[in-house]
Image (spheres, rainbow, N blue to C red):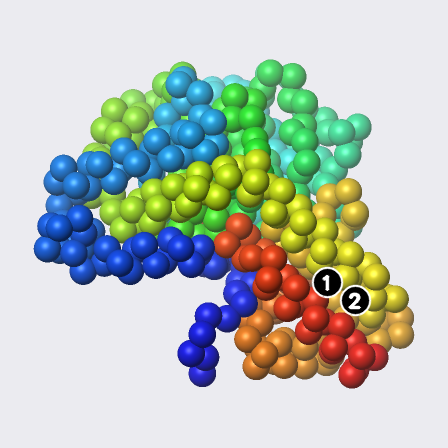
Amino acid sequence: MFNHRIHNFSAGPAAIPLAVLQKAKDEFLNFQGTGMSIMEMSHRSKEFEAVLARAIDGVKQVLGVPDDYAILFIQGGASMQFTMVPMNLALPGKKIDLIQTGAWTQKAHKEAKRHADVNIVATTESENFMRLPRADELKFTPDAAYVHMCSNNTIFGTEYNALPDTKGVPIVSDMSSNIASREIDVSKHGLIFAGAQKNLGPSGVTLVIVRKDLAERADKNLPSMLQYRTYIAENSMYNTPPTFGIYMLALTMEHIKETGGLKATEARNVAKATALYDAIDGSNGYYRCPVNKADRSRMNVNFRIYKGDEASEALEKQFVSEAEKAGLSGLKGHRSVGGLRASIYNAVEQNSINELIKFMQDFARKNG
Ligand code: PMP
């Protein structure tokens, strides 16, 4: 239908920087003169070993990972981490603390309960997760094994701007949907995990950054493939890793470095999100964002269309279908929330935001 690239607002798998796709295309059939693609060669080849090193170095430099942390590539998606984290980091007789901020922490909760007592530090479920808990609402367990949180709630469109103060208890953060979108202090975390398919590359590889001493908590009798220890000892090469995904992640990290690192990336993301929220807030109530202003995500922008005092599903359906025809794709909200959602990860450029805003203004004029 399109012979050009559309404006891709998909929540994930999501847009990948064009320069990364082009580089992969250029190298696709004959990787560095080997006469084969990266997907066709042994993971033990020196060429792939070099790619793995580029991926690890890239993550280390871009995110500023200190030396006492391991950078791992694991399969099974972010969802596998909902299981691996409590399996490896729970402590006998200690609680796991969890901040309940939406569907992804609920899934993490379900798995964590299998391994320990879980204390819900706070939840905003009664407000449909349209805000994050305030600092004064957080009731931490002083000697918890760790605190689980989700730094950006992909479905509900909330994002932390500062880490909660857990008084020294290690923070485990699910950063699947805002990793590498802003500067972070890795040293304030015990473990970070993120499925690659939003800001890091294609699906199939999950980045885990873990403080090495915490990985030593795990029972040595756990299945080898479910111990962080195994991945640390074997540099993520205990078995065949997802080679293509790791290669794409390496290219993505290099692209971030070439375009100014996380500082510049964050500035672009702030500009994009500000423009879009301003367009919503400035539409005289035609478009409305239900998310508490201070907690609004820079990555996933949720909004609804109003007819008078009520959100109109009919107009939203029309919006999605007309937008699709105009080359603006992936704007339907998550099925559990409804409405509209524009996911504007790193690879979605300001130009796509401008086109979306123009389309929104046009649509409001014609259907107001
Ligand atoms: N956590 C968050 C915040 C997510 O957005 C997602 C996927 N959208 C997941 C976890 C689950 O990721 P996966 O499908 O890779 O298991």
Residue 315, located in which quarter of the rendered image? bottom right
Other residues around mark 1 within 10 Å, as few (<14) / some (14–19) / many (≥20):
many
- Report if the CB atoms under discs 1 and 2 are less than 8 Å apart: yes
Q: Quadrant of the C terminus?
A: bottom right
Pick the residue in front: 221 or 186. 186
- Residue lying farthest left? 35
N-term-proximal mark, 1 vs 2: 2
Q: Quadrant of the N terminus?
A: bottom left
Pick the residue in front: 113 or 43. 43
Which residue is labeled 1 in the image? 303
- Identify which residue is drawn at 61% across, 68% down: 331
- In the rendered structure, the answer to whether residue 97 lies left or right of residue 279 reads left
Q: Give percent across and percent down for residue 333.
A: 63, 65
Distance from mark 1 CB to nearest ligand 1 atom below 8 Å: no
Q: Give percent across and percent down for residue 221.
A: 28, 26
Which residue is labeled 2 in the image? 287
Q: Is residue 59 above or below residue 26?
A: above
Q: Secondary structure at mark 2?
A: strand
- In the rendered structure, the answer to whether residue 240 lies left or right of residue 57 reads left
- Identify which residue is drawn at 77% across, 42% down: 294
Amino acid on which disc 1 is placed? Phe
Q: Is residue 91 above or below residue 292?
A: above
